[in-house]
Amino acid sequence: MYIHPSSDIQSKHIGEGTRIWQYVVVLPAAVIGRDCNICSHCFIENKVIVGDRVTVKCGVQLWDGVTLEDDVFVGSNATFTNDLEPRSRNTSPNLLKTLVMKGASIGANATILPAS
């Protein structure tokens, strides 16, 4: 496993062989599998599961409820959302889940909406 010194990796659930590059934040409950490549300037929230051999390119945020199965590719600046009706200071958001299935490829700048 390699973690760049400028990253803030709070999770203990990072698989063997995974590489995490500059300015990445991974919150404590996130799970990242083996042999992944998490590129610079990414944010991974608590209720996120990343499978094995996943590539997440630069500038991607994975919010609560996102699951990336094995062998998924996420292009630079792809955007995931988990709330179809976001509001400022919402104390009880209806957070939805997103499942990206094994082997899927998401292009750069794609916007991925959760299942409703």
Image (tube, rainbow, N blue to C red):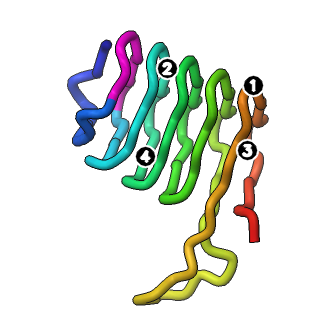
Residue mark closest to the camera, 1 vs 2:
1
Query: Quick one: 62 or 77, which is closer to the camera?
Result: 62
Placement of 104 over or under 100, stated as above or below? above
- Between 22 and 36, the one nearer to me in the picture: 36
Q: Please say whether residue 16 is one of the residues in the magenta stretch.
A: yes
Q: Nearer the viewer, mark 4 or mark 3?
A: 4
Relative image position of residue 88 (x, y in whole percent): 48, 87
Using the numbered discs, state the Cα–Cα distance from disc 1 to disc 3 in whole angstroms.
19 Å
Tell me if label 4 and label 1 are in contact, CB under 8 Å: no
Main secondary structure type of the part rendered in magenta: loop
Q: Secondary structure at mark 2?
A: loop
Whole-number angstrom distance, CA of label 4 to CA of label 1: 20 Å
Q: Position of residue 75 (x, y in %)?
A: 68, 32
Place residue 68 in its image quadrant.
top right
Q: State which tag comes first along the sequence, 1 or 3.
A: 1
Mark 3 residue type? Asn
Whether pointer 4 and pointer 3 mark residues with C-beta atoms closer than 8 Å, the reply is no
- Counting from the top left corner in percent of width and height, residue 82 is at 60, 66
| Real-space CA distance between mark 3 and mark 2, rounded to the nearest whole angstrom | 20 Å
Residue 109 badge: 3
Q: Which of the marked residues, 1 or 2, is nearer the chain's N terminus?
A: 2
Q: Residue at x 67, y 44 (%)?
A: 78
For label 4, the crowd category at 10 Å Cα-Cα, with few meaning under 14, some 14 to 19 and many 20 or more, is many
Mark 4 belongs to which amino acid?
Ile
Is residue 20 at all visible to an observer of this figure? yes
Q: Secondary structure at mark 1?
A: loop
With respect to residue 16, does 67 lie above or below? below
Q: What kind of residue is marked 2?
A: Cys
Question: Pointer 1: what residue?
Answer: 103
Query: In the displayed structure, does residue 53 sit left or right of residue 16?
Result: right
Q: Where does the magenta region start and end?
A: 14-22
Amino acid type at image mark 1: Gly
